[in-house]
Amino acid sequence: MRVVGRGRWRWAVGRLLLALGASGVGGAIVWAVVRFGLEQADQAAGVIGSVAGLTGLGVQLLATRSSEAAGASPGREWVSSAAGLSGYQPPQSSTPVRGRETELSTLHRLAKGREGGGLAVICGTGGLGKTTLAAEFARRAQRAGKAVFWVRWQDDAGLLADDLTRVAQALGLSESAVADAHSGRAVLVDTVWGHLAVTRGWVVVVDNVDTPGRVGPGAEPLANYRGWLRPDGGGLLLVTSRDTSTATWGTRAHLIALEPLAAADAGAVLLQHAPTAGTPEEARALGVRLGGLPLALDAAGRYLAQPTSRHRTFSSYRNALEAEFEDLLGAAHPGASDPEIARTVVRHTWELSLAHLEDEGYPLTRPLLHLLALLELAPIPRSLITPALLSDATGATVTAAEIDTALAGLHRYGLLSGGTSDGDPAHGGAAHLALHPLVRDVMALTPSETDNTTTLGALDHHLLQAAQEAAEAGRAGTVTALLLSPHLPPVLDRGTDGSLAESTVDALADALRASGHPAEERHLREHVLNVSERTLGTDHPDTLASRNNLANALGDLGHHQEAAELHRTTLTAYERALGTDHPDTLTSRNNLANALHGLGHHQEAAELHRTTLHTRQRTLGTDHPDTLTSRNNLANALNGLCQHQEAAELHRTTLTAYEHTLGTDHPGTLTSRHNLANALHELGHHQEAAELHRTTLSAYEHTLGTDHPHTLASRNNLAVTLYDLGHHEEAAELHRTVLTAYERTLGPDHPHTLASRDNLAFVEASTPAPRPRRWPRRR
């Protein structure tokens, strides 16, 4: 009780001091007029007024804090009376906000902060639901007893000044203080924020500040915090904006950058609108296709909820998007010239951002975004976007600095994202760009200043050039090759540069095979084969080579049945066209035998390998690399037939020949050593097998990297051997590393991943069970 009493006493003293100070200021000004005359007295009054203002601010702070301690804060009374101020209420909504609880928790924490909350900015591209999130938080803040004011930015600093002045007056700013500012005796923005700084319990939302450079007053950067948006209040100032740059908002602003909704949340939004349109899984699939964009989810949900709509299910709508995007989501709105309408329509919402960027002096942003939208919906290597490409596409001279500036502007307004694709430790990653799927769809509908034929021609030329460079770079170009691979099939489909395009894409596929990326390789091989069959025929040598390469990629993915069928068809065509002993025929027979071995048909595989080996020995000699390949693969087949002694002897002979002709670190030599170790393990020679596996693994890690399929197979087989030597803990650790890498690179359902998971479970259980799986290496 004494604390409360003391607080009230301090509040009374504060008010008395404030009154005495005001009387002193008035007396001082009268004295100055008598002593110096009116003109000089006006200057003196300015000085006296500034001193008095600072004194009064301190006294007001004392009084406010004292009254809060007393339980009867004037600030709290102002908040209570301001809570119903008409014209500044947040918008209402009957649907719950999905997937934003983390952001709402952050805002709640800021609003409860001891320093009042400061400045928070909900930012991101158009359509992400920034206003919806701010409105939901505002409603929650109202229910918690905060005085909430909703201000709509109208691209006019004067209107914002009027709005915030009214808010401050509702929170207790006196009419006389406002009058002083209007008469020039004080600065209005400082008067308003001086009052907001000492008043607690409020939340002010300024919505859609997409042109923060115009906030004012004056042209000073907003980040200097001397304008109408400041982090200095006793409550929380919450801004929504498409501008995501820290440089814009300053270091004291809390940026809450929105991302698209996760698949489950996107599906929940759709189900909320159209609960009978399908299953949760189908809703999630449509949500993913719409890129988790709340604006598009709401539009699709409302469409599906209409009983007269042509498409009434999530699956039907998703399938129709490819052919009917313009009708379903991309329709132009007749009132799109009004920004308030444009921001609510998928077709127009991003046009506002592009217009802002052009107004700010970024003329390259629109043609650059058009160019990026012509590529596939996949990350784009930053190295592809060069001045030469933009110059060829637009017909204008473009500099690297202009590209950097345009990309930065697009990123700032959330129209594209950037990142780094991981590479192996020896060569690092590669920068990439990415578009939201609906940004890409909308830009495809928007007329471009440049004819698409010219732009696509330039794009295809530079894609092929980049692919050739990545293929020639070997391991150092792997990450760029992976980024380029989704964008190359359309080049083949458009028929650009004909056979040159096919050979370039084939070269990139070879590079992906060498670096151990069979899924991406398969995608390219399928398109090359389709083009070759269409333009050259099914039995042309180039078509047969393409079919052979696709079958190899399928085998590497564990699709041995499909691979064997393709290899069998190819071998028949080779024998008919080239004869049984042609080198290409022998290669085809070797690859069919490998696919059969993968299927467990070891006897048929051994017979084919034996036939191929005899022919190669006769036509090429015993130490030719192709002959050594056949001997290695025959030994693997014999191992599969449990003829371990014969397999080991054949592997040892082959390894000696490899080391003699190709050296100790050649890929063929490493494969041979790996397979000899497997055969020795089957014979029970675990120590020798482990030593060979360690040597091979070290060489693979050095030459191919830690996640290459050959490296992973070597690490797996070392772990199997170590377990049989009784080194269970080391074996388990190796198996964990292998499983993690397989799940990341091949996916959870690949045969190697499944076998690796079984191997780890066996080792961890340490109970009798079938022996862990090993993998031979073939060539």
Image (spheres, rainbow, N blue to C red):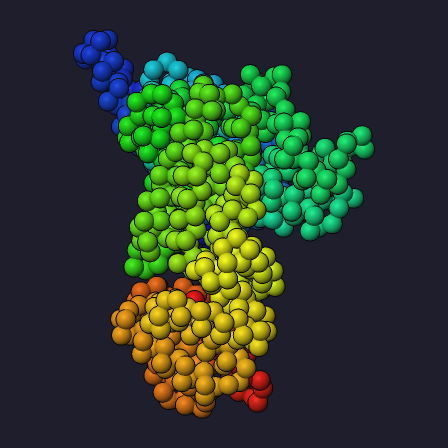
Above or below residue 339? Residue 696 is below
Q: Residue furthest right?
A: 307
User: Horizontal and vertical percent for residue 124?
Assistant: 48, 37
User: Is residue 258 something that shows in the picture?
Assistant: no
**Foreground pick, 361 / 238:** 361
Residue sitting at x 57%, y 46%: 538
Q: Is residue 279 above or below residue 50?
A: below
Image check: 699 left or right of 308?
left
Residue under the point 65% across and 35% down: 321
Image quarter of residue 379: top left
Q: x%, y% of residue 137?
A: 57, 41
Q: Is residue 611 visible?
A: yes
Looking at the picture, how far across and down is residue 259, in whole percent?
51, 43
Q: Residue at the top extreme?
A: 38
Q: Position of residue 474 (x, y in %)?
A: 32, 54
Task: Write down the quadrant of residue 11 in the picture.
Answer: top left
Q: Quadrant of the C terminus?
A: bottom left
**Of 20 and 177, which appears nearest the observer?**
177
Which residue does the image show at 62% across and 20% down from the upper left? 333
Q: Residue 720 versus residue 636: which sits nearer the camera?
A: 636
Decide: is 356 above or below 96: above
